[in-house]
Amino acid sequence: MPAKAKTYTARPASGARGRRGDSRAQAEARDRRRAISRAGGFRVTAIALLTFAFEAMGLLLACVREPGAVDAQALSVLALIAPLGLFTTLILPRALPMDALLMALTNFLCGVSIVVLYTVSTERGLRQAIFYVAGLAVMLAMSGIVSRVRRYKGLTLLSMALGIAALILPLAFGDWRYGAKNWVSLPLVGSFQPSEFVKLSVVLSLAYYFSAHRTVPQMLPAILFSAACLALLMLQRDLGTALIYYLTTLVMFYVACGNVPLTALGLCGGAAAAMMGYRMFAHVKVRVAMWRNPWSDPLGGGYQIIQALLAIGSGGLFGVGLGQGTPSQIPAYDNDFIFAVLCEQMGLVFGLLVLVTYLLLIARGASLIGRSRRSFEMLLGCGVLAMLGIQTFMIVGGVIKMIPLTGVTMPFMSYGGSSLISCLAMIGILHGIAARGQEDMEEAILSRS
Amino acid sequence: MTGAWYRVLSYGFGYVAAAIAAAIVLLSARKQTSDARLWRRVRRGLPQAGVLRVMSAKGRKLAAGLDIPVPYEGTLGAAMSCDVRIPARRVHLRSAFFWMEGDALHMVALHRDGFMVDDVPVEPGDEAVLHDGAVLCVGGIRLAWRVSRAAALRGETPEQPYVTRARRSRAQQGAGEGLGAPRKAATRRERRRSAQDEDEARPVYRARAAKPGAKKPAAAKMEKTNKTEKTGRKKQPDKATKPGGEGRAKAETAAASKRSGAAKTSDKRR
């Protein structure tokens, strides 16, 4: 039986796929257009609209919370933050150096914070909304600086000098709060934490000095500055922030030079310092003891952790309801333990999804800094992400009793102007780095074509 | 609204909020993965700064003819964290730091053993400028530097192929200074020296030009002078020795006039 002859049918010629080469070229051109496009796409639009819906529903619920009364302030907060979120996610990235997805995730986290805080305390919710607006302005300023400034030597030295001065301020004029002297009260400005803003100068100085030839002696000025900041924070008894600074320095050191022995040495030094701190400071001993067994002192040192764990547990999977529950039972429920309040009211599922959102934020930041061509930008972004990630891990881990509790705030979530503004400033740095990467890509595409 | 209705609505809001958060997470993850794929696709079509082609390899990991892509800035060495990884035993973990300026690759040694460019040793403290075709020798591995077309189109031919003392050990951070940038006084002195007459008596060492039929390529020029030469004069020997075709490769190193404490002091000041 003769073998059946094979037949080849030519593809019908069409405008877009007439030849294989044309379709590939068109696909490449389409990819390049999308790569340099500043628009976020339909997914980012969907995220922005979902965030808008969440804020609208949450604040409308808060508006009718009191039987027979309508809270007009909730409507004003809604009118302030919801359109602002849409504007900063959908419109601004087309005109300014910003990344749309990063902005969308940031707006979602800030929106959750404002909604939850408003139902817990209307005054705190309103102030948080105002801090959010101020933080957006700072974020845009930082984004503009990072995307436009080319010489960082003067800025680095200035920020180092200002950082040291800012950390000395609380020691000279500060108040003792919750066992630490890290707050400064100024007329017309109010009280703020200088250590939240010194984070930016630490990251900047480390990135500048580590991005040169990366030999250890050349990194010394930044290491010494970081050590000075650590020493001042130890004097303030702000050990949580000191730990964040230390771990960020270590991460940036390893990323810059890849020197495993020295990094391990630094880690051992940190462990030794932690042991010394445990012996020197009584409240550290208390925190470690309460982490090991909070039930040993349920009405004293362990009260806070126990209440937080009970709140998380009583919330179940989907929470007791917005504005329900008893968050005021937890000491510092609006800043350090906001995560416990969130889990109680919105449920464990929502709390886990918020943590996944943090991970996505960090992953997005990592992909943005991976596009940068300059080591300075990469290290700056790495420092920012390390700070945000370490701080989030420390506070969530402390709340759920995974690690001993430290007195740090949850980024974007905790009530506090200093914390929110400094976190948004760090997001602004990431926006600037994203913009530089975009410019380099545009340049590369244009030079090739 | 009564309290009971509020409780019902707020309890239901928990489910809605979880659904909204799940949708946001899924959309963000999808957007992130699609963006990453898009950038990888686009970058594949775009060249990096250039490639280092392995000329003489040892071992299984480095075959002769292998092209190692080179980004616009990074480190070179055997470590996994290096931007240009050369997996060979004799290559140090971090051998050099490089960056692109125009269409030339600038490289400084990070290890005391240094490296060689066109058979000219480059020690720590010196800065090598590699043009297209330069042969880099690090840890016994010979690599030919080929600049990409995009970088070549965008780059400008530098007026001074030699790196002057004022520009030595400068990390590229935009167009500004970096760690180790000289002070303004040093820059002014450098400019005064470059404006002086060429006949000033200073020792200048140059490699001999390759004789016709010579097997070895002409070695790069070595100068032990602080003075920079004029552009025209520098380019002439290259045109004279090159047999034709596109410019071969010229790697110039700016060697310190005194390989003593003066140069090392300026290095330490960094």
Image (spheres, rainbow, N blue to C red):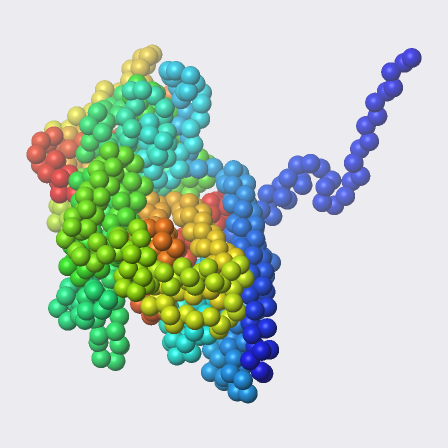
Is there any visible trace of residue B81 in the rendered image? yes
**Nearest to the observer: residue A35 or residue A136:** A136
Q: Is residue A128 above or below residue A304?
A: below
Is there any visible trace of residue A381 in the rendered image? no
**Nearest to the observer: residue B208 or residue A214:** A214
Which percent across, then down, holds residue B245?
Answer: 42, 25
- Taking the view exactly as shown, the residue that stands out farthest to the left is B261
**Nearest to the observer: residue A85 or residue A404:** A404
Q: In this view, does A274 lie above or below B2?
A: above
B39 to the left or right of B266: right
Which percent across, then down, holds residue A146?
Answer: 35, 57
Residue appearing at x 21%, y 65% in the figure: A179
A265 to the left or right of A306: left
Which percent across, then down, holds residue A23?
Answer: 67, 41
When asked about the image quadrant of residue B241, the answer is top left
Q: Is residue A100 above or below residue A121?
A: above
Residue appearing at x 41%, y 24% in the figure: B53
- Taking the view exactly as shown, the residue that stands out farthest to the bottom is A68
